[in-house]
Image: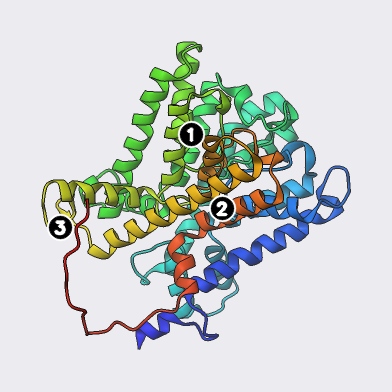
Amino acid sequence: MIKKIKEKTRKGKTSFQIIIGSFFALIMLGTLLLMLPISSQSRTVTPFADCMFTAVSATCVTGLVVRDTATYWSLFGKCVIITLIQIGGMGVITIGLAIMRASGRKIGFAQRSTMQESISAPQVGGIVRFTGFILKTSAIIELTGAALLAPVFIKDFGVIKGIGYSLFHSISAFCNAGFDLMGVREPFSSLTTYSSHAYLNIVIMLLIIVGGIGFMTWHDIGTHKLRFIKYSLQSKVVIFTSLLLILLPAVYFFLYEYSDLGIKERLLSSAFQSVTARTAGFNSQDLAEMNESGTLIMIVLMLIGGSPGSTAGGMKTATFAVLFLSAITVFSRRNDVQVFKRRVPEDAVRNAGAILFMYLVLFATGGMVISRTEDLPLLTCLFETGSAIGTAGLTLGITTSLSMLSKLILMFLMFFGRVGGLTLIYAAVSSAESSKVKMPLEKISVG
């Protein structure tokens, strides 16, 4: 009975359908607001396609843009974009549940179940309190980030504009969105003008890491402090995997990229590109100047993305870790996937395999279609689709020149990467009752 309640809300919609519908509704609202003349600096109506692309990118915290954020959109338009980023980063369901709680409305089991699915929480119990933790933590981190960035931007842009820039970039970095306002210096330049500014680079990197590591992991850290042994298995895997995915690519970038830079800027750029590649969307160096092996590493990092229950997208670090551990299990001929003296459930291994398959198929197919449609190099197009499905927002500079078909592909991939592949599948396919009857077993050779 409880399972059926969890499957369906009072209106007959599953939690997965509600999550997808909420994101879509927010995107359409953002699109309509951006179409208003007041949203552009020229006070003209922006084409529907450009507004929708921008709304999808902001809501799905990606960062791919067809109009320079700083120079094209007005103050109202920028406020719409940062609001979409904030809601999309924390989750539409999280914000909705918070509003319900603030208005004194009773939060039923169906709403709690939907919230659990939206943030990949392990259980329904305590989910309302956890919503409060997400809101409070996000506000504290974003305001702290803005305060840390303020001295830099106030110095460069004045008090009023500097404070606005600080808050915008703090929210964008924490939500792993990658939208920036540096187009006032050079359109679509991101943070390249600050590539040697150690303080700003470090603050932005910390905001990206904090946002991408996941609220459940931060709840573990807040509860158990530095007692790593008491963390949940997911938190242990997320922290360990995140560290490796930051350090190893940074070493490669330092050794084989940016060799023409000084040691300080080389260190900063290597670390920054390693951090930002997994869904953040900022860049401090011209990505088009990277060699092909560096570009390929960036694509892999974008596909992996952030961690479960975070502001980031992608396959997720935990998925990558489970796949890696599964391979190790096969190589060592063990029966169970094990890590930190715990067994990983079989359904987690199956889900990880399914997610990898979906991401690779959509990423590769999208890249090939765009390459054929636009007559562009395949690796360049794969970088674009990897950035979209990983909600990374990095680009080699082709986004603005793409045709409508290619932009539609990127919008679908951004939406897929943010809401999650399994969420889309579960929303489209009705759950089947498990049968006690099993088919005959027959072996099949693989490898």
Judging by the rendered image, the residue that carries numbered circle 2 is 414
Asked if the residue at tag 2 contacts the one at tag 1, i.e. Cβ–Cβ closer than 8 Å, the answer is no
Cα distance in 3D space between marks 1 and 2: 22 Å
Marked residue nearer the N-terminal end (2 or 3): 3
Q: Amino acid at mark 2?
A: Met
Q: Quadrant of residue 303?
A: top left
Q: Is residue 96 above or below residue 75?
A: below
Report which residue position mark 3 lands on. Answer: 336
Compared across the picture, whether 37 is left or right of 198 comes to right
Sooner in the amino-acid sequence: mark 1 or mark 3: 1
Residue 111 at what x, y percent from top left?
49, 76
Q: What residue type is disc 1 on?
A: Met
- Image coordinates of residue 436 in percent, x first then y, are 22, 85
For mark 1, what is the residue? 205
**Image x and y of residue 410, in percent:** 60, 50
| Distance (Cα) linking label 2 and label 3 | 34 Å
Question: Which amino acid type corresponds to the residue marked 3 in the rendered image?
Answer: Asp
